[in-house]
Amino acid sequence: MTFGEKIAMVNGAGGAYVGNIPANTRLGIPAVNLQDGPAGIGDGANNVTAFPAPITLAATWDTALAWQYGSQMGARPAAKAFQFCWDR
């Protein structure tokens, strides 16, 4: 990886997301777009639950809480019959 390519990977680029890492086609590395904030259903859905960011869960080291969090994260979209982008 050239010095310029390394800088592009750690510096990022402008874009619609909080973090945008440009693709490096020479090395076959795809672009990465990062979004921070709460977890849960988004994409314009109404009346949904916004869960705390998963990093807060990780900081608790509480496996029972992690199980409950994951269980609820899976139940919410199912209850709303939400179709994920790969199902569209």
Image: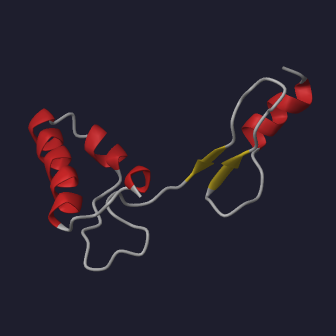
Left or right of residue 14, residue 52 in this image: left
Q: Nearer the viewer, residue 77 or 50?
A: 77
Q: Position of residue 84 (x, y in %)?
A: 36, 56
Q: Is residue 19 left or right of residue 35?
A: right
Residue 6 percent across, percent down from the top left: 81, 29
Q: On the picture, is 23 further left or further right than 76?
A: right
Relative depth, front residue between 16 and 63: 16
54 and 74: which is toward the camera: 74
Q: Can residue 59 be seen here? A: no
Q: How many marks?
A: 0
| Left or right, residue 27 beside residue 55 | right
User: Is residue 76 positioned above or below 32 on the image?
Assistant: below
In the image, farthest residue toward the front: 88
Query: Looking at the rendering, which quadrant does residue 64 occupy?
Result: top left
The percent position of residue 32, horizontal first and vertical second, equals 64, 43
Q: Above or below — where is 84 with respect to 25?
A: below
How has the structure been colored for display? secondary structure
Q: Residue furthest top?
A: 1
Q: Quadrant of the C terminus?
A: bottom left
Q: Would residue 9 be seen by someone viewing this image from the given angle?
A: yes
Q: In the image, what residue occupies the spot 37% across and 53% down? A: 87
Q: Against 45, is 8 above or below?
A: above
Quarter residue 22 falls in: top right
Which image quadrant for residue 26? top right
Q: Quadrant of the N terminus?
A: top right
